[in-house]
Image (cartoon, grey):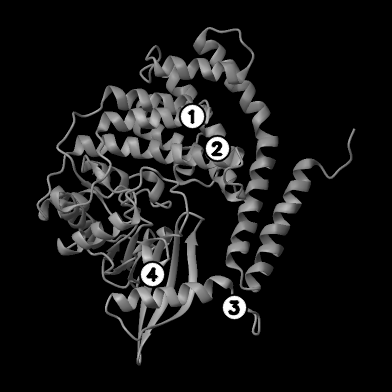
Amino acid sequence: MREPGAPAPAWQSTLEPALAAALTEAGLAGAVVQGLTRLSGGASQQTWAFELLRGSQSRPLILRRSPPGAAERNSGGAGLAAEALLIARAARAGVPVPEVVCVLQAHHGLGDGFIMQRLPGETLGRRIAAAPRPVLARQCGEALARIHALPLADLPPLRRTQPRTEVDHLAGWHARHGTVRPVFQLALRWLADHAPADVAPALVHGDFRNGNLMVNLHAEGGALVGVLDWELAHFGDPMADLGWLGGASWRFGASARPVGGFGQWQALFDGYAAAGGRVDRARVHWWQVLGTLRWGVICESMGHAWSTGAEPVMEKAAIGRRASETEIDLLELLLPRSATA
Amino acid sequence: MQDAPTPEQLLAAVARYLRDEAGPALAGHGDNALAYHARVAANMLDTVRRQGLLAPAADAAERARLQTLLGSADDDLAILNRQLAEALSQGRLDGTQPALADHLWRTTFDKLAVDQPGYDTYRRLADPPPSPDA
């Protein structure tokens, strides 16, 4: 909040009229942008919230953009224009997503990105995992089946991957951090020894987990309002999304509810099958192990980025010490105590 | 000999200040992001304090287990761990050996006791069980 009388920050005077101009082109002439607030993001990707006023009507919107001149940090990312197209295609297939209002063009001077509807609901993982939400788990299955059924020909070009490629990628990424972790090596070896065969690629959301889902907590059993954060979308094994969603890192202490801390595997699988998907449980388990290791390597990468000075933010150093969480989760998956004690 | 308070006590004092005084004061000024980072800072000091208290004994036990497992007389914990990581990577050792599984569990418990004692999987499985206030 600004002190009364303090000068408006420089970005406000440039961002607000540019947004209004972009929205006017999208058919929202006469609209006024108000209450622009930065929600998150670093130099390369930002999320802003604002209100769009037209007459007596106010519409809550979100701007996702990488500002002009920003370098792409995640070179494997789909890109924001591709993300907007994916969201629009998913909406057409019946996946709950925010409506894309406008895709930014170069002449708007806002960088790459898009403007979308700001959905009401909860995204905080801990709150969503605070109770059993069987309806939500089933709806996640339905949404994933519809995402995985999208015809690839209608979609923007995305990175393609296969199970074995992902193992090699994680092994290399971990090695570049220079850390020594016997449990990660155990997991990498297990993943390599048990890698499923290549599949006909489907659209994979890539980060479908508790934390990236907009949820109506007031609905009985929960209700999926929107699937967010499509930036890691790619073409690959659809079972990857189910295994990632069921990882221990997104249960927020609710280990009795493996799916995001809110649901059971069976509810997820039932929803997936009801919407026309086919579950391969062995593959889901393999991707659950890979996803757990992936989160560990991501934690490590944040600690590494802090120690090299690339991202000198205190919290990154703290997250570096969270890789151990994934080591105990990997041991529970691969060497269960009941079998060894 | 250095005077009291001990390093552990000094760290605990700063952590308590950040958690109970600085954080709430920042939140009171409406800056939730700074208040959040004060809590993160307090948690980091707690990690340092626990590492000072717990790591010497845990490291010694880990070293002894690794020397037995690997048949090595090496004293350097980092080198021993590198040897274990290589053996696992190459499949020369695997989880079917009870002594190896036991070693990985114990080592992992000891790590979490220092850096993430509140993590759910640790609290469910830790042997011996963690203290309730850890």
On the question of residue A321 being in view, the answer is no
The tally of labels here is: 4
- First reached walking from the N terminus: tag 2 or tag 1: 1
The chain ID associated with circle 1 is A
What SS does tag 4 mark?
strand
Amino acid type of the residue that numbered disc 4 sits on in the rendered structure: Ile
Left/right of residue B104 with respect to residue A26 in the rendered view: right
Check disc 3 and report the residue beneath it.
Answer: A8
Relative image position of residue A20 (x, y in whole percent): 39, 78
Packing grade of label 4 (10 A; few <14, some 14-19, many >=20) is many
- Is label 3 on the same chain as label 4? yes
The structure residue drawn at horizontal position 73% and vertical position 58%, both measured from the top left corner, is B17
Check disc 1 and report the residue beneath it.
Answer: A176
Check disc 2 and report the residue beneath it.
Answer: A304
Residue placed most toward the observer, B33 or B73? B33
Report, in whole angstroms, how far the alpha carbon at label 3 lies from the one at label 4: 21 Å
Which disc number belongs to residue A62? 4
- First reached walking from the N terminus: tag 3 or tag 4: 3
- Is label 4 on the same chain as label 2? yes
Q: Nearer the viewer, mark 1 or mark 3?
A: 3
The structure residue drawn at horizontal position 58% and vertical position 50%, both measured from the top left corner, is A315
- Is label 1 on the same chain as label 3? yes
The chain ID associated with circle 3 is A
Report, in whole angstroms, how far the alpha carbon at label 1 lies from the one at label 3: 44 Å
Left/right of residue A108 with respect to residue A177 in the rendered view: left
